[in-house]
Amino acid sequence: MLKNILCCFLLSGALALSAQNDSSKFQYEIDPSWVYYAPDVPELNVLVYNKDNERSASDIKLNITTDKREPLFSFSQNINLQGGDSTKLTYSFVLPQPGFYRCTLIEGGKDVKRFNIGYEPENIVSLGDAQPDLKDFWDKAKAELAQVEPDYQLTQITDDSNKSRKLYMVKMKSLGGEEIAGYYSVPVKKGKYPVVISYMGYGSKPWIPGGTPGYAEFVLSTRGQGLQEPTNTYGDWITYGLDSKDNFYYRGAFMDLIRAVDFVSSRPEIDNNYIFAEGGSQGGAFTLAAAALDDRFCAIGPTIPFLSDYPDYFQIVHWPAQPILAKQKELGLSDAQLYETLSYFDVKNLATWIKCPVIMGIGLQDEVCPPHTNVSSYNRLSTEKELYIYPQNEHNTPDSWWNTRMAFFDKHMKASSK
């Protein structure tokens, strides 16, 4: 069964973005529908309010471009308002194809507000660029990991344990004998528990789990990051070993994700039928990659995923394009060589292997992991899936996401128990 929830208007579809700066003559409320679907024609409404007591006039322009800043439309008109008066501007246009589009409101030649809208996001096509040996490459890595004795070491952290939960520092060995670590929280009451593995964002600081009643939780720090960052030997992780798919940082990091599943599966208090994963940004990419490379998950909940659709990604945002392209130049790599290496780690290419249900949350205004890159992997999923697009959010999801995701996990835990 294929299920899609296309857009979640958390507060309401009519909620406006307010826009003003000290030099603006007017105050603006921008009220789009955010995400549009055929046959409806996209329409933006902009309420312009004269915040001064005296009459003011200015040229108002709305520019619309593609994700890659290719110009599409430019609307302009002069506004002349008495003090305290307002007027509504309505812009209607036909977008050329499914995608995400950049809108810029300009007053008197100065940008007032920038925001993104979407058109038919689930019909955006991101072509795969997987190499013929992609599966063999990852099968070899997993075989190497299986030869490494994990040597799990648990140390209880008594200061952060309590009557209901115990907290442990966990250390283990991963690919290449590299030590990785994490925080593991489990209910004190004896029994079999579902578990949520949390994969961390790029450079995130590790956190103490323990806020999900009825679940065990494991927060993993991959090699060189989080708990391992003080002894990091990889420098800027995303550029490490960029000259070879066998040496690239994420070959080992992706195996660390599987080792985390190995760990929770080894625990007597864990019900291995109910292993879940979640994470945001790099953690979102890790969540997708883990489920692609390991079929032990009951369901996963990635948000704002990183590491996807590199050829388009690098044309949309400056980071991580800048350090990667600088390293490419330093190493003397051609574009073909660079993108061939990255294709092995592009979650867009791995997403087709995912078998478990997926719920994904993304921010429409995200300029770090833009929504185009998020849906590049989502649209290639062939499993049950739900997509929540949060119109107001940037590189984050709202607080309500936690409950939405856990309800999804609970639903699939109950469904799989029947």
Image (spheres, rainbow, N blue to C red):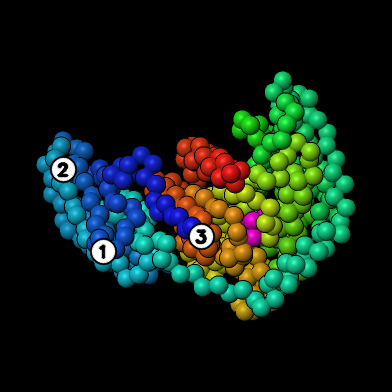
In screen coordinates, is 145 left or right of 329? right
Identified by mark 1, the residue type is: Pro
Circle on res. 86: 2
Above or below, 278 relative to 92: above
> Residue 203 at what x, y percent from top left?
66, 48
Left or right position of 68 against 78: right
Q: Which residue is mark 3?
A: 378
**Residue 108 location, x and y as percent?**
25, 55
What's the residue at 36%, 45% (across, down)?
9
Boundaries of the magenta span:
288-292
How dense is the environment of label 2, judged by Cα within 10 Å: few (below 14), some, or many (20 and up)? some
Q: Amino acid at mark 3?
A: Tyr
- From the viewer's side, name the closer residue of 80 and 32: 32
Answer whether residue 46 is visible to the viewer in this image.
Answer: yes
Where does the image place residue 279, in percent across and percent down from the top left? 60, 47
Tag 1 residue: 39
Q: Residue 302 in magenta?
A: no
Type of amino acid at the residue the image marks with label 2: Ser
- Tell me the distance, in whole angstroms, between the alpha carbons under discs 2 and 1: 31 Å
